[in-house]
Amino acid sequence: MKEAWRTRSTSTQTALNHRSRFYAELWRDAAAHLGAGIEDLGNDTFEIRLNAECTRVQQNTTMLDRAITCAVAQNKPLVHRLLAREHLRTPSYCEFTLNEIGKAAAFVEKTISGCVVKPANGGGGRGVTTGVTGTPGLVLAAANAAVYGPHLMVEEQIQGNVYRLLYLDGVLLDAVLRKPMAVLADGQSSVRDLIRRENNFRLKTGPNRAHALIVTDLDVRYTLAIQGLTLSSVPKKGSLITVKTVINDNSQQDNVSAKHLLGTSVIADGAAAAAAIGVRLAGIDIITPDPTIPLAQSGGAILEVNTSPSYHHHYYKRDGSYPVATHILPFLLGVRASELHTQLA
C-alpha cells in the first residue's frame, strides 16, 4: 500500500513538473518574440518587462481579469443565471446540498437524457460526473462532488461535441473541438491497464501529450458502464474505448482546430457569454451537435465561462498550434495596436 501511494505521489509530481515546464517555456518564447525581458520569480511566477511596462504571470493566470471576475466565473449557478438574463442557452439545472438530495433526485427522475453532477464552485473537471441516472447514481455522484464543497448542482446532459472558444476582449482568437479521452484496446489488457499505460506514456513524453494524468474517478466508471464495461474488462482488440466523458484529462490527439467550423451565431453567443460575466480572456465551453447553426436550432448550450483558461489544448492539437501567450502578452504589456503589428510581423 505504501509503495502504491509513493508511486502515485511521484507520478503526480512529475505531471505537475511537466505542466510547470510547459508554461515556463511558452512565456519565455512569448517574451522573446516581443523583445521583452523575463525574470523567474519562483513558484511558477514570471515578471515580464517591456520598456516601462511590467506584468506578472503564473502559468495560465494573468493580470487581465480581476479577482471578482474570477470569483463570479467559478460560481456555476450564478454564471447560468447571468447568461439566462442575456437570453443565452444553458442546460436546465438544479442547485442542492447533500441535505437536499430529494430535490436533486426529482430533477434527475424527470430528465430523460441523463444528468451531470458537479460542485457549484470550482473548475478543472474536479468532482464532475456525467451519465447520472436514477437516485442511487445521483447519491454517489453527489457524494463525489461534495468533496470539493457543500454546494452542488445537477444539470441536464446535453448531447453533442464540446468546443472551447477562446476570446480576448470579445474577439475570437482560437477554437478547439475537444473529444473525450479514448484508449485503443489490444485484446489482452484490461481497461485499467490501458489507462495506466496511457498515463505512463504521458509521464515519459512530457507536456506535449497532455497537461494532466487521467484520474480514475466516478466519471470513468460511469462512462465505461454506458459501454457495458468496467475497469477490469478486456475489450476486443482494435476497439476504441472512451474512458472518460469529462474532457479535462484528454490528450493532444483528442483536440482538433475548430475555428473554421463555427457559424456566426455560435461565435456571437460565445462573445456575449464572455461579456455577460465580464471576462477579458475567456474560455467558453459550448456543446452542440452542429456548430454551424444557432444553439436554439441544434439543441446545444453554453456549459461554462472560464477565466484563466488552460492554454495546452490550443498549443497542442492534432492538426496545429495556436500560441496563446504570444498573442496576449502585448495586451498585458499595453502595446499599442500600431506597435503590436510591427512586433508580431
Image (spheres, rainbow, N blue to C red):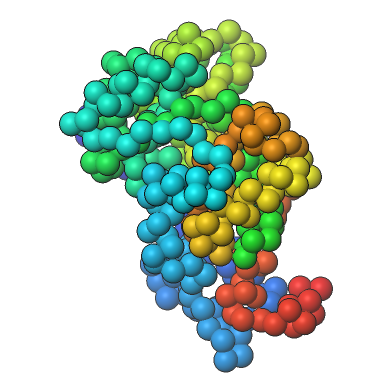
For the point 62% across and 50% down, the residue is 270
Q: Could you tell me residue 139's position as x and y percent?
A: 27, 22
Query: Looking at the picture, does residue 102 appear above or below residue 227?
Result: below
Q: Position of residue 326 (x, y in %)?
A: 66, 67
Residue farthest to the bottom, as pictured: 52
Question: In which quadrant is the C terminus drawn?
Answer: bottom right
Q: Where's the N terminus, which quadrant?
A: top left
Residue at far left of view: 99
Q: Is residue 244 visible?
A: no
Would residue 269 be found to the left or right of residue 195 on screen? Answer: right
- Between residues 89 and 174, which one lies in front from this camera angle? 89
| Count of numbered badges drawn on the protein | 0
| Vertical relation: 284 (above or below) 90 | below
Q: Pick whichever, 80 or 332, lies toward us.
A: 80
Q: Is residue 167 visible?
A: yes
Q: Residue at x 70, y 73 (%)?
A: 33
Residue 107: give x, y in percent of width and height: 36, 24
Quadrant in the rendering for residue 342 = bottom right
Say which residue appears at 30% left-offset and 17% top-offset. 135
In the figure, is residue 113 to the left or right of 175? left
Residue 76 found in image quarter: top left
Of residues 117 and 48, the one nearer the viewer is 117
